[in-house]
Amino acid sequence: MRINTNYLQLGGRYLFAEIARQVSAYKSEHPEADIIRLGIGDVTRPLPDAAIRAMHRAVDEYADTKTFRGYGPEQGYDFLIDAIIAHDFAPRGISLDRDEVFVSDGAKSDTGNIGDILAPDNIVGITDPVYPVYVDTNIMAGRKLCYIPCHAANDFTGDIPTEHLDIIYLCYPNNPTGAVITREKLSAWVDYALRERAVILYDAAYEAFIQDDALPHSIYEIEGAKQCAIEFRSFSKTAGFTGVRCGYTVIPKELKADDGTSVNALWNRRQCSKFNGASYISQRGAEAVYTPEGQQQVRVTIDYYMSNAAFIRTSLADMGLTVYGGQHSPYIWVSTPDGEDSWHFFHRLLTDANVVVTPGEGFGTHGEGYVRITAFGTADDSRAAMGRIKAIL
Ligand code: PLP
């Protein structure tokens, strides 16, 4: 047999695996070090009680022959799809049919797997810095990547390209920069995609962190987007489901490939062959997120993280650092002091302050000169970390 040699083009390790390796090497040399981890974007607050209770009930259903369930629909249960449409889209004036929503085990799988149904010779536009999954999965498929620089001068939303692209990944609120996109700028991207007959892969995993209602939560708030965009959502950051696993992808039936093929039908075909549905327990938990109690509990948790974000932002700014993000997003994107190399600053924070952040360069060349700090830690850790960073700067 032969391997897919595209995999040999990947960097040595997935970014967060490399950071974990470096942190554990440091920890084994300094077992006494009390390390605060504000690197990986994992949540720390427990799940909303409404979701916990719904999942307990779902487990009990498994214990009885009358309510037991085996394989579910590959696309997800209607009870969850109906709740998604009613709460995430209808209030924003977006109508979707049930068969335009595909429930999954999370946005990482879907943003990675979507390439299965797209030709390898599509030219892919990737904002830089970026969530590494988009880059890696396109390298695996052997696609040509064009990087779209995102920096303070374009509000980290990229300049509309002058050349042709077939696929464009956009993620707002953004990981890693914490930036958001305005309706006007998103409209400009949609216009580009319609003009170029390109598809926008819109990752809205952090949509729940948007604090200003004038900002778009979904790309389908923009006219014409149903003909040119796929949207990915996740319960991971919204409701603490990083370990439970549940997300969904919207593919409108209006979205057609150049030859007229329905992208929705093709994804459905792909999912039926390669995916056996998200767990019933996870889907019942996700459904409960939309109940009034679930919504209220999720809001409390998001407010907790956003108050960490505000504290981190203001503390770093008071230290004289330039900070971005953290206002509609759990990520704070920080310029390194005096243009210090981002891996160097990462090491300095690890060894001198025992604080783990993520070096911006790990997200792409345009991430050099920055580090990403997450607000997903505990309030105590966020405070302690800022104190330690202040002490070493
Ligand atoms: N998309 C972005 C931009 C993310 O940052 C993450 C996780 O960090 C994901 C998707 C993955 O989400 P999930 O847990 O649903 O797989």
Image (spheres, rainbow, N blue to C red):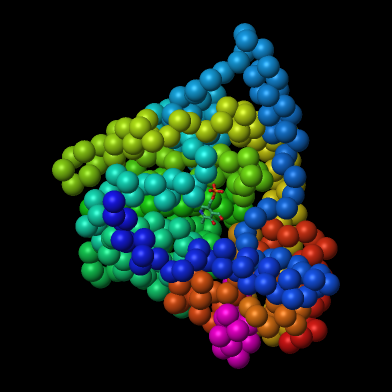
Magenta stretch in the rendered image: 332-345
The residue closer to the viewer here, 91 or 56, is: 56
Q: Is residue 118 visible?
A: yes
In the image, farthest residue toward the top: 66
| 340 in the magenta segment | yes
The residue closer to the viewer here, 212 or 64, is: 64
User: What x and y, as percent, mark residue 78?
Assistant: 50, 24
- The residue positioned 43% from the left and 50% from the top of the image is 111
- The residue positioned 68% from the left and 17% from the top of the image is 63
User: What x and y, as percent, mark residue 186?
Assistant: 41, 58
In the image, farthest residue toward the left: 259
As drawn, 273 above or below 128:
above
User: What x and y, as percent, mark residue 59?
Assistant: 68, 24
| 148 in the magenta segment | no
- The residue positioned 56% from the left and 53% from the top of the image is 206
The residue closer to the viewer here, 384 or 8, is: 8
Image-quadrant location for residue 16: bottom right
In the image: residue 305, left or right of residue 183: right
In the image: residue 25, left or right of residue 381: left
